Image: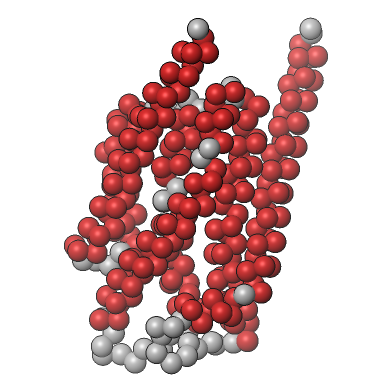
Amino acid sequence: MTEHEQGQEQELHLLEHLTELRKRILITLGTFLVALCAAFLYVEPLYEMLTRDVEGQLQVLGPTDVIWVYFMIAGVIALAVTMPVAGFQVWRFVVPGLSTVERRASLAYIPAIGGLFLAGLAFGYFIVYPMVLSFLDSLSNHFITAYTAEKYFRFMINMTVPFGVLFEMPVVIMFLTSIGILNPLRLSKMRKIAYLLLTIAAVTITPPDFVSDILVIVPLFLLYEISIGLSRMVYHKRLNKLELISE
């Protein structure tokens, strides 16, 4: 095969990969849009549920603020629905390069993506969000507080969605371990850097007091240690399966 033919074959493979990637992205975006439209149909009951503890009514500064708030609420719901689909599309994209053992092992992690994202949202909404809101309210005793709907829900989303993403750590690490990219030894060596990054994220999100920082940092550290333990289990299981296949 000449160099020209090799170059043409490489370009063809690249084009096939780009076409496949485009397909997976379009499926994920399509799922998000469908879920967004479906969530928008039920956004008013969700709004009432999320504002049940608010005294009085939230203010809007313009007619478009209402639509913007509803889209923020529906967007979070759509994101939660889309996460497992996005994970499956990533799996479909990388599956041609995986062995049979790696395919089966990595596919099992897809259902956990949605559950962990919801767990992260719950952690942010029931623990971090009320804690931070209470702290900020305590600072506003000398002010007349009047929350707008847009600022209120933007604040709520900032306190919840990042934790939904962070709680995906175990399943991402297990997936990368199952396909041979990560291993428990490497994760252990990265512990100091990981702790530093998690601490920075926690301190950035929480109020500037020691108790709030600890309440967020400790669960994140535990999450990383759990991820290392799960990675160790997956790693040894993968080695055993590869040994059986080689025999």
Locate residue 69, reporting x and y percent. Answer: 56, 76
Say if 105 sits above or below 52 in the image. Answer: above
Q: Quadrant of residue 55?
A: bottom left
| Residue 236 visible within the image | yes
Display coloring: secondary structure
Q: Which residue is drawn at 62% across and 48% down?
A: 85
Relative horizontal placement of residue 212, taking residue 63 as reference (left or right): left
Q: In which quarter of the image is residue 81?
A: bottom right
Say if 170 sits above or below 61 in the image. Answer: above
Locate residue 67, reporting x and y percent. Answer: 63, 79
Say if 208 sits above or below 16 in the image. Answer: below
Relative horizontal placement of residue 66, taking residue 214 as reference (left or right): right
Q: In which quarter of the image is residue 226?
A: top left
Locate residue 35, reporting x and y percent. Answer: 65, 62
Q: Which residue is drawn at 29% across and 52% down?
A: 219
- Taking the view exactly as shown, the residue that stands out farthest to the left is 210
Q: Which residue is drawn at 30% across and 32% down?
A: 188
Locate residue 19, reporting x and y percent. Answer: 75, 37
Q: Residue at x 33, y 66 (%)?
A: 128
Foreground residue among 212 and 96: 96
Which image quadrant: the N terminus? top right
| Residue 68 visible within the image | no
